[in-house]
């Protein structure tokens, strides 16, 4: 189950079956008004893919993750070798000595060269899978206009409903999930980007006639992105909830909820420098902004 965070981030990773989002390619509004809903989506996705292939600026940001009843706030920093993260808060409280020691040991293990290479290999595979899935979306669904509104920044936001397209032949096993999904997506027409995708499985989806796996009706995901700095779009919210089974007996349970904010550009650094960068950040008890959002 992997997919859309575009970048190399944990955000998009687990979407494997879904996919979606990432920089800014301006559109002329008069031109966009002439596009059919399908072409509007196709052009936005092409912009996403152009941006995804041109990632040159590195960032650090905060991310809140919910896993069951527990929440964690992490500071994440990009490096050319991959992302490095440090836990700042657990259930909105600074880590105690034992928790800090445990996280420091986790950082040490996950930044070993072999682990960084493994994560980079997984990231590249996820990114390629995401690109294939993205390119499939315009042909997998029928789209209808729902409404248009203005965002606080003045951008035109167009909402489109989507339902499975009759006769669509999934080009891959992952794309089969689209045959049972419907929902709504939001296109930022001013920026020419996908701003939000909200999808729900309206029927069970079988893989390999149900032998390889099945996702149950009711599975749901939400992915939102925004311009987090001038000319840079990134995933700011992701919710995944899916139940199913794999190879007849193994249960699939995905229940993730992530929100990202406070994106700041950083200079390229080594993994060792990134770890030092994280250790030198402000102490959580002195930074009330960590409690957002």
Image: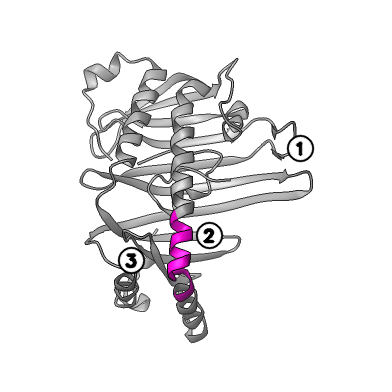
Q: Is residue 21 left or right of residue 154?
A: right
Quarter holding the N terminus is: top right
Image quadrant assignment for residue 159: top left
Give the number of the mark in front: 1 or 2. 1
Q: Secondary structure at mark 1?
A: loop
Q: Which residues are magenta?
A: 108-120
Say whether residue 114 is magenta.
yes
Q: Position of residue 177 (x, y in %)?
A: 60, 33
CA distance separating discs 1 and 3: 48 Å
Structural crowding at the residue carrying mark 1, measured as other residues with C-alpha within 10 Å and reported as few (<14), some (14–19) or many (≥20): few
Image point 71% across, 40% down: which residue? 213
Tell which of 69 and 118 is nearer to you.
118
CA distance separating discs 2 and 3: 18 Å
Q: Earlier in the sequence, mark 1 or mark 3?
A: 1
Q: Position of residue 150 (x, y in %)?
A: 29, 31
Residue bearing mark 1: 211
Residue bearing mark 2: 66
From this viewpoint, which residue is outermost toward the bottom? 97
Structural crowding at the residue carrying mark 2, measured as other residues with C-alpha within 10 Å and reported as few (<14), some (14–19) or many (≥20): some
Q: Earlier in the sequence, mark 2 or mark 3?
A: 2
Q: Earlier in the sequence, mark 1 or mark 2?
A: 2
Structural crowding at the residue carrying mark 3, measured as other residues with C-alpha within 10 Å and reported as few (<14), some (14–19) or many (≥20): few
CA distance separating discs 1 and 2: 31 Å
The circle on residue 1 is: none
Give the number of the mark in front: 1 or 3. 1
Q: Position of residue 46 (x, y in %)?
A: 34, 29
Residue bearing mark 3: 289
Image point 53% across, 49% down: which residue? 14
Q: Is residue 10 something that shows in the picture?
A: no
Image point 61% across, 30% down: which residue? 176
């Amino acid at each position: 189950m992997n997919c859309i965070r575009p970048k190399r981030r944990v955000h998009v990773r687990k979407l494997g079956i879904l996919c979606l989002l990432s920089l800014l390619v301006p559109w002329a509004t008069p031109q966009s008004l002439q596009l059919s809903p399908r072409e509007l989506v196709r052009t936005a996705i092409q912009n996403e893919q152009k941006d995804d292939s041109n990632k040159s600026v590195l960032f650090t940001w905060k991310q809140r993750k919910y896993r069951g009843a527990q929440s964690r706030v992490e500071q994440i920093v990009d490096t050319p070798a991959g992302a490095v993260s440090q836990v700042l808060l657990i259930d909105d409280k600074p880590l105690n000595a034992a928790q800090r020691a445990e996280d420091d040991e986790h950082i040490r293990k996950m930044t070993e060269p072999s682990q960084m290479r493994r994560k980079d290999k997984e990231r590249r595979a996820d990114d390629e899978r995401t690109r294939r899935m993205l390119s499939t979306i315009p042909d997998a669904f029928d789209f209808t206009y729902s409404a248009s509104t203005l965002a606080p920044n003045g951008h035109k936001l167009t909402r489109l409903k989507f339902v499975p397209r009759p006769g669509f032949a999934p080009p891959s096993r992952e794309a089969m999930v689209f045959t049972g999904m419907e929902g709504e997506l939001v296109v930022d027409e001013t920026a020419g980007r996908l701003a939000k995708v909200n999808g729900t499985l309206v029927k069970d989806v079988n893989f390999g006639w149900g032998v390889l796996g099945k996702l149950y009706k009711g599975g749901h995901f939400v992915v939102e992105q925004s311009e987090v700095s001038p000319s840079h779009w990134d995933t700011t919210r992701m919710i995944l909830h899916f139940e199913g089974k794999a190879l007849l007996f193994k249960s699939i349970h995905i229940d993730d909820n992530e929100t990202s904010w406070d994106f700041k550009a950083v200079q390229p650094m080594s993994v060792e420098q990134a770890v030092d960068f994280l250790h030198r950040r402000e102490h959580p008890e002195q930074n009330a902004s960590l409690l957002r959002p």
